[in-house]
Amino acid sequence: MHSILNTMAHRGVSSQAPENTLSAFALAAEKGCQWIEIDVQLSSDGVPMVIHDDTVNRCTNGCGKVREMTLSQLKKLDAGLWFGKQYQDEPIPTLLETLDFVQQTNINLNIELKVYPQDDVALLCKMVDEVIKVSGIAPTQILFSSFHTQALARMQKVLPEVRRGQLWQKIPKDAISILRDLQAYSVHCDYRFLTPATAQQIKEFNYQLYCYTPNFPELVDDYWRWGVDMMITDVPQAYAVLENA
């Protein structure tokens, strides 16, 4: 079970390139990952951007809230230099640019819908829907995930053919009823809070089970036996090493 094919590159190969950039995504494709996980939120002018935090402070040379900056302002920022000099002038990608990349490389994309306080969930879902339709990507090549159940419920209405994964830190007791309502495909949870009994329950109902973010494969050796299908990790390459061990 220890295979790079059972990993999802968390924000790309974010251990070796700046997270949520095309360079990090290209590394994932080069290493043979079949899945990339990204974070999407809107610029002030309604463009779905690929960035995790609600501000640009940590991962760019700028400062301020993503939702208060236009596409043009966000595109002027350097999203690579903080990670290393070789990544200087790496831009924040749009969702559309990322969809183009995954279509060219035939890799699958987990789009996490980021919802922060004051965010307009309806507008986020509407703009993501529009971009996906413009891109022409096959629904089978993408998966939506979110901690925000209502965002997933909205996507279920507008793009029912795209699979949905509910994110939880710790899987709640009423998980199955929430998953049923969403007609969910997968459950994504923090590996540190998963128990064999909870994993068994999720698998009994035939949901895919993904864990974030185990960066040391030996910590999750037993999890494959519990039924976990995929690890969402910053270091998918560490799992590849074990294939030949």
Image (spheres, helix red, strand yellow):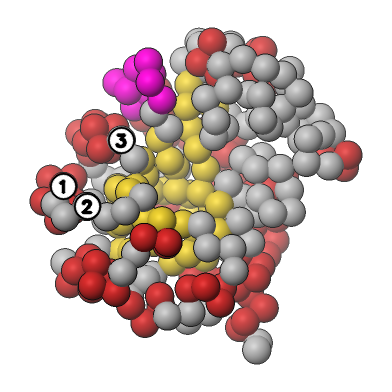
- Identify the secondary structure beneath mark 1: helix
From the image, tell me which residue sits under label 3.
148
Q: Is residue 104 left or right of residue 179?
A: right
Q: CA distance from mark 2 to mark 3?
A: 14 Å
Compared with residue 78, is residue 176 higher up or lower down, i.e. above or below? below
From the image, tell me which residue sits under label 1.
178
Residue type beneath disc 3: His
Residue type beneath disc 2: Pro
Closer to viewer: mark 2 or mark 3: 2
From the image, tell me which residue sits under label 2.
172
Pick whichever, 152 or 156, lies toward us. 152
- Res 238 visible: yes
Q: Residue shown at 52%/73% (left/top)?
A: 219
Q: Is residue 144 left or right of residue 56?
A: left
Q: Residues within 10 Å of mark 3 (few under 14, many from 20)?
A: some
- Marks 2 and 1: CB-CB under 8 Å? yes
Q: Residue shown at 54%/34% (left/top)?
A: 52
Closer to viewer: mark 2 or mark 1: 2
Write down the region rendered in magenta. 116-126
On whether residue 117 falls in the magenta region, the answer is yes
Toward which corner of the image does residue 206 lie, by quadrant? bottom left
Q: CA distance from mark 3 to mark 1?
A: 12 Å
Toward which corner of the image does residue 77 lie, by quadrant? top right
Compared with residue 112, is residue 107 higher up or lower down, i.e. above or below? below
Question: Percent x, y for residue 57?
Answer: 66, 24
Residue type beneath disc 1: Ile
Q: Is residue 172 left or right of residue 225?
A: left
Q: Earlier in the sequence, mark 2 or mark 3?
A: 3
